[in-house]
């Protein structure tokens, strides 16, 4: 598959909102995912969105999907220091039962 | 109650050795996967395994072989380890193909 692209770094102040962007490759992907990886830890599924949705909200997390531009974003409201981690977007490309991950965005929350 | 578990958590070994990493899931899922995360944090699929059907990423060297003794386990065996094999290896499972995947904690492999 082609590369799923993300910005490598993002720094925000505690209490501000964070927006992590992702450009995916396959317009026919059924699901798009956000995973969180804390230092030295595994991948934690944060949320996912079905391709026929434009937005999904889950507590402090808001996922926006723009299918026309193949753009996915994750907004974290009231960002906390515990949100510091690497965030990966991933797409489930149709015809392939595996995930293609973005490069990951390292979010640093400044107290 | 760990959903997807991997052993060992850390593995340090010398070049040329053969090693295995074990993965177990207690979720009753039908599909399991292995991913490799390199030093730059890039994650790539290596294998997926569903109902005894193995799908291999063509870029994976044939020194890597997954073995599934039963539906709850997918172990990764690596022959003739090379320096470039140093990475974090993640196992994952999903109820079926193209369904949400849940990851294990990772195995950190260092080849000296």
Image: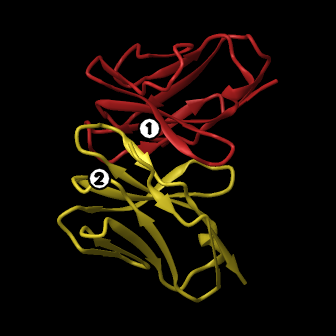
* Badge 2 element: loop
The number of callouts visible is: 2
* Residue at left offset 41%, top offset 53%: A90
State the residue position of label 1. B92
Relative vertical location of residue B59 with respect to residue A91 in this rendering, above or below: above
Q: Can residue B108 be seen at all in this image of the molecule?
A: no
Residue A26's mark? 2
Name chain B's colour.
Answer: red
Residue closest to the far bottom:
A16
Relative vertical location of residue A25 with respect to residue A62 in this rendering, above or below: above
Residue A96's mark? none
Q: How far across and how far down the image is residue B33, in percent?
A: 42, 32
Compute the Cα span from label 2 to label 1: 22 Å
Pointer 2: residues within 10 angstroms few (<14), some, or many (20+)? some
Q: Is residue B107 left or right of residue B61?
A: right
Marks 2, 1: nearer the viewer: 2
Name chain A's colour.
Answer: yellow
Q: How far across and how far down the image is residue B105, in percent?
A: 57, 42
Rendered image quadrant of residue B57: top left
């Amino acid at each position: 598959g082609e590369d799923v692209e993300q910005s490598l770094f993002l720094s925000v102040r505690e209490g501000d909102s964070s927006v992590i962007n992702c450009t995916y490759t396959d317009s026919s992907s059924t699901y798009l995912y956000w995973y969180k990886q804390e230092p030295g830890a595994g991948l934690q599924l944060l949320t996912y969105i079905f391709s026929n949705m434009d937005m999904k909200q889950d507590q402090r997390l808001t996922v926006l999907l723009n299918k026309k531009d193949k753009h996915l974003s994750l907004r974290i409201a009231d960002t906390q220091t515990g949100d510091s981690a690497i965030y990966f977007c991933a797409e489930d490309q149709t015809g392939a039962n595996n995930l293609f991950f973005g490069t990951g965005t390292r979010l640093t929350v400044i107290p | 109650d760990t959903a997807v578990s991997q052993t060992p958590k850390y593995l340090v070994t010398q070049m040329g050795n053969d090693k295995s990493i074990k993965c177990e899931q207690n979720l009753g899922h039908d599909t399991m996967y292995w991913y490799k995360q390199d030093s730059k944090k890039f994650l790539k699929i290596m294998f997926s395994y569903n109902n005894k059907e193995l799908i291999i990423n063509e870029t994976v060297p044939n020194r890597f072989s997954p073995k599934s003794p039963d539906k709850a386990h997918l172990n990764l065996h690596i022959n003739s380890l090379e320096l470039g094999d140093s990475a974090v290896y993640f196992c994952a499972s999903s109820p079926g193909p193209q369904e949400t995947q849940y990851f294990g904690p990772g195995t950190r492999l260092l080849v000296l």
